Image (tube, grey):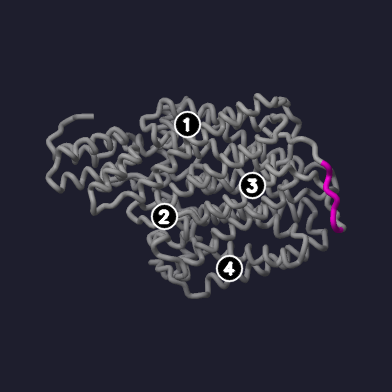
Amino acid sequence: MSIELPPRRAATPQRRSARIPVPDAPAAVRLAAVLLQVGAVAVVLAVVPYPIFQLDRYTFPKELVLGVAALGATLLCLSSARRLTVFMVDTLLAGFLLVSAASTLFATNGWLAFRALGVSLAGAALFWCARTVARAGRGEALLVGLAGGVVLGAVTGLAQAYGLVNPDLASLTRAPGGTFGNRNFMAHLVTIGLPVLLYATVEARTRPRFALGAVGVALCAGALVLSRSRAAWVGAGACGAFLAVEGLWLGGLWEDERLRRRVVRLATVTLTGLVLALLLPNRLNWRSDSPYLESLTGLANYKEGSGRGRLIQYGNTLEMAARHPLLGVGPGNWPVHYPLYKSAGDPSFDADDIIPTNPWPSSDWMAMASERGLVALLLLTLVGASIALGAWARVRRGPGRAPALSDLAIVATVLAVGVVGAFDAVLLLPLPTLFTWTILGALASSARPLRVVPLTRRSRRGALAAVALVGLVFLGRSTAQTVAMGVFDGRERAAMERAAAIDPGSFRIRMLLALAWARAGRCDRAIPHASAARALFPNYPAPARLLRACGVRNRR
């Protein structure tokens, strides 16, 4: 779906350029582009210093930024719209959202389902807004801003690796995660954003911009190798191989003298960044004497370690999907049901921990199949396939014609998301959701539309009101989650009670509060919170243990 804007007078170019002049974008769309650029920076930096909340202190603020960026950009783009142009990919994406919404209605834990649905809705809104911004002639500026956000994310990881980041903001157990809280998440963003960073660098209009982009690529390469994220390494390798084969070799781009010089320089700077990252002393305390070689040689190791753990988890998750094939167990509800499917010695489950599982499975595609059903997984796959195959067809179209770098970047981005998402959570999380969908929207070329829907003033006002209402509801939830973390104080039960009132869907707050009352000998105050925690996660052992200690038997 593309939001069509009223016709504007073409801007007169101020200097000689080979680029075709584009219409001057309306003020609202220019502001939407700026908002998306600011969002790309803010979502990278968003974190709160509350270590007790582990990954939540990174995820919740980033969800809030995602919601603000999506809602603000959508309202701005709609405010000056005259008609909606619907493409095939839009119907597939809308179908995925509808199935996800239906799955949400039947979820055991509605709080988690609501959060997960909000992330998906925000991603779709960003895709449509970014495409509108690009069609209005602001796509290049938006892509440069997104590329800058990717480099900033890599810099936060490097800063932690070399001891230059506040330890209150960076998790020490998953270094170098920077402001992501996890080295894998930092590496995922670098891999997903690498194609658009390369595109913006190679297409830079001036030498200083190219030099700046080349430095950014070198920083990303250094952060990527230091992360030891095997999923990101595989994804980056797949992207690099595709760009080299389809662009430089089969596409004939290597024959372009200017582009060839830039590619050689870029490769030299990147290699320098990799070497420096490996040679410069850092503060990463790896247990292995050869950590990077160990990660490289263990890429395909499925017999032990995390590889074996993933295979066990995937098998159990597929069983969950087979039991709930139509709508799944509900968005975000994989951890609620996983204890029912765990196997003996399953490394994905720790019965001694208050929260015995991760918040999500180690694969987007396993999550979609088990949480939203096989239909939702198929629709999302078709969304990615339609975007990638359409761009790939344009790359291959026309003998002797060099492919557009933007089309190559589209396919490489979808490839990166697909590969990384096969081994880790990507589209389940707010930060990669913002970058993935905005990049694809800003790059995507329009195919033949299926339908053009005119927007009257009345219908536009109705659409603005509906978007504002839905967006504010999701923003209210994200705000409550973040505020509750700030209110929570483990040394003061009154503060913990206030936090539970602000965010009643937080299993962590409920359990910590129940344990605090139980230790104080007040089971009468502990039981309501333990019961609420058990209702949120009925298959977790910790609430049942606490209730039994307080004399409550077989109570849900």
- The residue that mark 4 highlights is 274
Secondary structure of residue under mark 4: helix
In this rendering, the count of numbered labels is 4
Quadrant, the C terminus? top left
Q: Is residue 126 magenta?
A: no
Indicate the amino acid at tag 3.
Answer: Ile
- The residue that mark 1 highlights is 372
Indicate the amino acid at tag 4.
Answer: Leu
Q: Look at 45% across and 69% down and name the residue there.
A: 290
Q: Is residue 31 above or below residue 200?
A: above
- The residue that mark 2 highlights is 48
Question: Which residue is nearer to you in this view: 419 or 99?
Answer: 99
Q: Which residues are magenta?
A: 9-15
Q: Is residue 13 magenta?
A: yes
Which label's residue is closer to the chain start, 1 or 2? 2
Q: Locate residue 554 relative to residue 57 in the image: left or right.
A: left
Of labels 1 and 4, the one closer to you: 1
Which label's residue is closer to the chain start, 1 or 3? 1
Question: Which residue is nearer to you in this view: 433 or 523?
Answer: 523
Residue 408 drawn at (x, y percent): 71, 48
Q: CA distance from mark 3 to mark 4?
A: 25 Å
Indicate the amino acid at tag 1.
Answer: Arg
Which label's residue is closer to the chain start, 2 or 3? 2
Secondary structure of residue under mark 3: helix
Residue 223 drawn at (x, y percent): 54, 63
Question: Which residue is nearer to you in this view: 17 or 14?
Answer: 14
Q: Does any portion of residue 313 appear in the rendered image?
A: yes
Q: Does any portion of residue 241 appear in the rendered image?
A: no
**Label 2: how many Cα within 10 Å (few below 14, some 14–19, many 20+):** many
Secondary structure of residue under mark 1: helix
- The residue that mark 3 highlights is 439
Quadrant, the N terminus? top right
